[in-house]
Each structure stands twice: as structure tokens, then as C-alpha cells.
Amino acid sequence: MSWVGMFPGQGSQEPGMGMELLEKYPELLIDIFDDSLGWSLKDVINNGDAETIKKTNIAQPYIFAISYCYGLEAINKYGQASALLGHSLGEYTALAISGYFSFEDALKVISVRGEAMQKSVENSNTGMAAVLTTDLDATLNEIAVLNSQDIEVWISNYNDASQIVISSSIDNLEYLKSNAKALAARRVIPLEVAGAFHTETVSPAKPALAEALEKVQIQEGTIPVYMNVDANLATTETLKERLVDQIDSSVMFYDQILKIDTEIKPGEWVHIGPGNVTAGMVKKSISSKEIRVINSLESLSK
């Protein structure tokens, strides 16, 4: 089967996710995790509430580790994927599964990334919102008009044919929530995040991430990975630079989907990890495709 694996980013977490994996992957989720980060994922899985796992420094390593294990399960079940991609944080899962860097190194880098991103948005009074539209070009034009009027609205994610994620001040987002027509949109839905990620607000996080990546050994991956910043394939020569740039660049997930569909022509698209968000993005962009969701061991047998 020709298939593409997709890994979710922050926001897909829920309390107790991955509990079934603790017994199957104790070395990764208990031993290596505890040694690498100095805190217990097992405790978070068993006791962490929604507020605890929403914190960036907890959510990012947690989502990565769980998604990675489900990724191993998916490859064991279906064989080698034709390509991989991830949404923001999920890009690290795709790269680790491909073998560009180890599970342990990815954890350490993600921990630094999460801490630095959290610090950069503290007291920024910014946030993010999903914009649902039936005319993407019209919505993008309205955002350009707002920016020309010195009203800062950034596009953090191009998710699919009918959804982008914007970032701005909390006041701007509250106004747009009640006035979606100002963006030629159906709805504007504020997201439960700490601040304006994938914008210049988090640019101060880049030096810390670059330093952490310099300590990581990059090897050639075994599965092609399409990257967020430009929808092009990962290479060992440019990988670190593009991961640093990803911090304050738009996530071009929609472009990635379209490019993979053209170049790979996969028979199936597989969301791997908590939730099902990337599956929805593919369905809205290329609805004729077969889509599968792997977010539990039970789902592997369906």
C-alpha cells in the first residue's frame, strides 16, 4: 500500500492519551523520556489534567512521544510509508520516524523549543484563531487590507482549502470573532494557545532552538519528509536552518498536501497521533482520497 503519514501538532492533546503505550514502549516513554527531560511522562499520563497538558513545555514532548510510538506501530502494520509530514511540532515526529535524528535528540530539542516558545509569548497579549472561509483568496485579500492599515494580522498556518490560522492581539481576535465578514469568512474561532506562534512574536525563541539543534547529529532519513516552511523535501544540509525558520514562519500544510498528492500520488493518507486534525485537512483539500486515523492501538486493527 502506498501511504503518507501525517503527525499532529500542539492542540491535539487530551488527558490520559497514550496510556496504552506505556507497557508496550517503556524504554522510550519511561526510561529515555525521564532521563532526557528530567520529568515523568508516566506521571503526566496518569495524573495530568487538561490545564497541565496544555502548557507548551509539557504538551510538545508529550504529543511527540505518543505520536512517535503510534508511528512505529503504523509502519510495523502497513510497511514503509511513501512520505511523511507533520504540522508544526509534528514535523519533528516525521523527521524522527524517518531517522534524521534520534528519538532522544528530538525530545531534547523539542523541550528547548517548547520552553523558548512559551517564554517568548508570555505577556505578549497575543493569540491565534482558526478562520473558516469559502473563498480563501478573498480572505487573504482582506488580511492584506488590514495589514495595510497597520492592523497586524499574521497568517500562522495555511491548513487546507477552507481554513487558515491567524495570529494577532487578543483585542483584534475578539473583534474578528464577532465580525467574521471583515475577513470574508464564515467563522473566526479563537484557539486555546499561549500566544501568536509562527509569527515574529516568537522570533526570540530562534537562537535557543538553533543552539539546541547544533548539538544534534543529523543523518540521512529513510523516508522522504516534506517540510512546513516551503513544502519541499528535507535535506541534511538545510534541515536545521529550516527548523529554526519554522518557528516564526507560516506552516504551509495546504501546500504540502497538494505537492505530495501531485508527486507521490499516495493511495492512502494516514493521520498518526492524538486527535484527527490532519485527516480533516486532507479531506477538505482533496476529498476523493482514502484517509485513515491511527490514534489508538485498536484503530490499527480496523
Image (cartoon, rainbow, N blue to C red):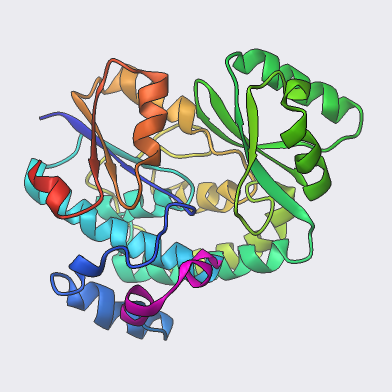
138 to the left or right of 63: right
Residue 275 can be seen, yes or no: yes
Q: How far across and down, in percent of the image, does residue 43 sit?
A: 35, 82
Q: Which residue is drawn at 19% across and 32% down?
A: 3
In the image shown, does 227 or 181 lie closer to the viewer? 181
Residue at image location 45% in from the left, 50% down from the top = 9
In the figure, 97 relative to 31: above or below?
Answer: above
Give the dominant element type of the magenta stretch: helix, strand or loop: helix
Q: Is residue 208 above or below residue 154?
A: below
Residue sitting at x 65%, y 62% = 205
Q: How many labels does the image show?
A: 0
* In the rendered image, the vertical position of residue 176 relative to residue 266, given as above or below: below
Residues in magenta, as a range: 42-55
Q: Which quarter shows the C terminus?
A: top left
Q: Nearer the viewer, residue 95 or 165?
A: 165
Where, quadrant-wise, is the N terminus in this rendering?
top left
Farthest front residue in view: 178
Residue 281: % across, % down: 42, 30
